[in-house]
Amino acid sequence: MVREMGWNRCLRVANWLTLVIAPVLLYGCASVPLRVQQGPLAALALRAYWGTPLTGAAHNPAAQVFPAKPSDDTVIADVAFYAVKRMPLNQLTPLDQQKTLVLNIATSHPTLATGKLTRGSLFGVSSQPAADVTRRLLQASGGGSFLGLQRAVVAPGSTAQFTVLDRYAVTSAGDHKVIRPRMSVAIWDPAQGHVEKGPRAGMALIVHEITAVPNGSAGSIEAAEMQVLPVYRIQHGVAYALAVPFRLLTGSNEAMLAIVHLQPWSQTPANAALYQQAKPLFAGNPTVAPVGPKLARPDLLEAIKSLDAPAVQRSALAYLAGQTGARLTLDIALAADNAVLAQLAANGAAAIGPHPQSLSLKQLGWRLDRTTFQLLHAMNKKKPLPPSLLVPLIVHIGEAAWHESSLDQIAHGLASRRDYRQHVIAENLIYLQDTAPASRIAAYDWLNSHGWAPAGYQPLASNSARQAALDKAENDPAYLQRIEK
């Protein structure tokens, strides 16, 4: 009788939720102007070598010993890449109008009068902070996707090459070599010939594109070009910006934006750690950020920042959950009162951590759902959950939502989403053997709705018939494989 009253109450709440959640979702999402950006589009790579982009890597790199300590001429270089909708015209100076050297590096390095792959590129130097320069150029470019930022030590006489690679590659004609469109910014320290004291660095833009075979035959070949800029004296607070007409195969961007920040060496813990990380690069071990679903999503990063803003917490959390597949979090965020919502947002921000860019969409979604379940579990320990929270929990974990012992068991299985799902399934399978028909029916309905119910099982059948169906399922490899995915 009590259980029936509980269900009736939950059904009334569910009906109420259908009237309330929809307007809350529309209003909440409208309160934060977040735009969905495509991502991930590319991977990043970083390599270092002794020599300059003009000379290439030294023939005997082993003869070059990486200095044990940095010198006063050591440079710290930061390069951030963005895929933008269009070129930020009237913001930077055409690269062709500046003192540069253009090389066709695909065919024996001959010089070119004008660039072909780099044609239309823009370059500028600004004394404004790099963040302000980036904001201005992104606005002029119609917005874009942040692809990543890399830092490197540029030791005297060496080059650090920062590269953004297209997510996909093609096979070239003839030699069947795998080629991948990519754009690089090379930063080097000339090591000698300084007229003035103090660190100096040169820059070069390198573009590798895929083009058709000249004679019209089927297939593709790789074209490569490098445009070398002058050597600059490094000063504090100076930002360099490159905008290049470079379209990714998998994106809708028209251009690539590179923001370069160079600074003289200063002895800080972060720089000291970076210096130690540089040694393997010179040994020929480039670092490559894997092409994968990392969080190159400005919209999600902005929503994460909004989790501590009470006015937009609900819409920010709902947006994050909806974009990352955190369905439990989405339902609870829409149904929770302000106090629970504030706690959920705070717990979610703590679970995401200070470096959300390192997470994939799946990882972010799981952290949100794990945090949501942990909060509901902790609340239920103090007193039974209110119907507004119990109803969505029942939708997600079935009959287990009614029992504190089951919630405890599920709480032990939060190492991964797969682990969590298997614990939820196991708890509902247990209730198929419960003496209460209501528990068996609820557990069976939930399992059946997800395709996890044992074949031939009927919750109102006799004990022997139910047990026979469960025994058969327990020895069915196909069924076991289905529920263990």
Image (cartoon, rainbow, N blue to C red):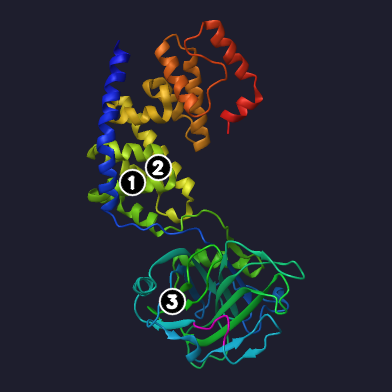
Closer mark to the observer between disc 2 and disc 1: 1
Q: Is residue 432 above or below residue 447?
A: above
Residue 187: image x %, image y %?
54, 78
The residue singled out by tag 2 in the image is 368
Disc 1 crowd, CA 10 A, few/some/many (<14, 14-19, 20+): many
- The residue at the point 47 percent across, 29 percent down is 412
Q: Amino acid at mark 1?
A: Leu
Q: Is residue 318 left or right of residue 175?
A: left
Give the position of the N terminus as an image quadrant. Answer: top left
Is residue 431 located in the magenta-colored stretch of the structure?
no
In the rendered image, is residue 463 in sight? yes
Q: How many marks?
A: 3
> In the figure, is residue 8 to the left or right of 181?
left
- Segment tinted magenta in the rendering: 115-120
Question: Which residue is under mark 1?
Answer: 317
The mark that comes first in sequence, 1 or 3, is: 3
Kindly identify which residue carries mark 3.
87
Q: Residues within 10 Å of mark 2 (few under 14, many from 20)?
A: many
Closer to the chain start, of discs 2 and 3, is 3
- Quadrant in which residue 441 is drawn: top left
State the image coordinates of residue 70 (x, y, percent, origin top left): 53, 74
Residue 299, image x and y in percent?
A: 38, 57
Instruction: Specify the amino acid type for callout 3.
Output: Met
Spatial separation of the CA atoms under disc 2 and disc 1: 9 Å
